[in-house]
Image (cartoon, helix red, strand yellow):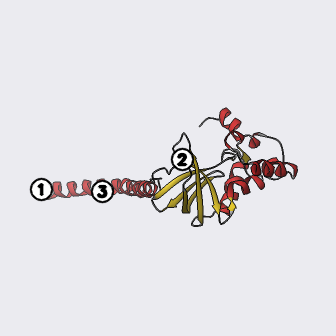
């Protein structure tokens, strides 16, 4: 009888341990699935040389000036050439800028990259085209990004920014840090 009692108590304890560990198993599985999906979406393409043109597909729009593109040799993180968009933390400007770029280049849409450079974060810096439309220039036209003058050599961008300012479009509706994202980043480091 004591043997049976000990066996039953042992089995009861095992069952209780299994029940208490079940939530942990679920948590570990969820974290694993999330990590694997993120790993699969991490940029893995070699950085292309300056002047290279690539046909790609938008995989993800991070904010108003950064995307991940799926190209024939893998995923490539791209900083859009010559513009600077408000950061997501610059409410509501950052989200509006990101949403404007998502409308211009939704996930899965075909784009052409014209590589201009590589930045210090290991991203390709490229003009982004949907058909013949320069999406960086369009973001400036809509007032959803500003010209990054120290890095932009194309006069059309400055003209588009001047028109957006005069028309009080996007970030030009009212004065503020959204008009100088580089200054905002200095004051709000990550």
Q: Which mark is residue 3?
A: 1
Mark toward the viewer: 1 or 2: 2
Residue at x 38%, y 57% (from the top left corner): 29
Residue that sits furthest to the right in the current view: 166
Please tell me in which quadrant of the rendered image residue 135 appears. bottom right
Q: Which mark is residue 18?
A: 3
Which callout, 2 or 3, points at the residue further toward the start of the chain?
Answer: 3
Mark toward the viewer: 1 or 3: 3
CA distance for labels 2 and 3: 47 Å
Mark toward the viewer: 2 or 3: 2
Q: Quadrant of the C terminus?
A: top right
Mark 1: which secondary structure? helix
CA distance for labels 1 and 2: 68 Å
Q: Position of residue 59 (x, y in %)?
A: 54, 61
Which callout, 1 or 3, points at the residue further toward the start of the chain?
Answer: 1
Mark 2: which secondary structure? loop
Which callout, 1 or 2, points at the residue further toward the start of the chain?
Answer: 1
- Horizontal side of residue 161 vs 57, given as left or right: right
Residue at x 69%, y 58% (from the top left corner): 134
Q: Which residue is label 2 attached to? A: 123
The residue lying toward the viewer, choosing from 177 and 77, is: 77
Q: Is residue 80 above or below residue 56?
A: above
């Amino acid at each position: 009888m004591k043997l049976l009692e000990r066996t039953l108590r042992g089995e009861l304890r095992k069952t209780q341990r299994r029940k208490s560990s079940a939530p942990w198993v679920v948590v570990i599985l969820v974290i694993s699935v999330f990590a694997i999906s993120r790993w699969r979406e991490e940029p893995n393409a070699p950085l292309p040389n300056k002047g290279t043109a690539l046909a790609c597909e938008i995989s993800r729009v991070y904010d108003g000036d950064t995307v991940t593109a799926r190209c024939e040799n893998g995923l490539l993180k791209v900083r859009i050439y010559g513009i600077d968009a408000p950061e997501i933390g610059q409410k509501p400007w950052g989200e509006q800028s990101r949403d404007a770029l998502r409308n211009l280049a939704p996930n899965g849409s075909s784009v052409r990259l014209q590589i201009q450079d590589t930045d210090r974060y290991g991203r390709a810096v490229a003009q982004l085209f949907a058909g013949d439309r320069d999406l960086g220039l369009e973001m400036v036209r809509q007032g959803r990004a500003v010209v990054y003058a120290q890095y932009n050599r194309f006069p059309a961008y400055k003209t588009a920014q001047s028109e957006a300012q005069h028309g009080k479009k996007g970030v030009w509706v009212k004065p503020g840090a959204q008009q100088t994202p580089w200054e905002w980043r200095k004051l709000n480091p990550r």
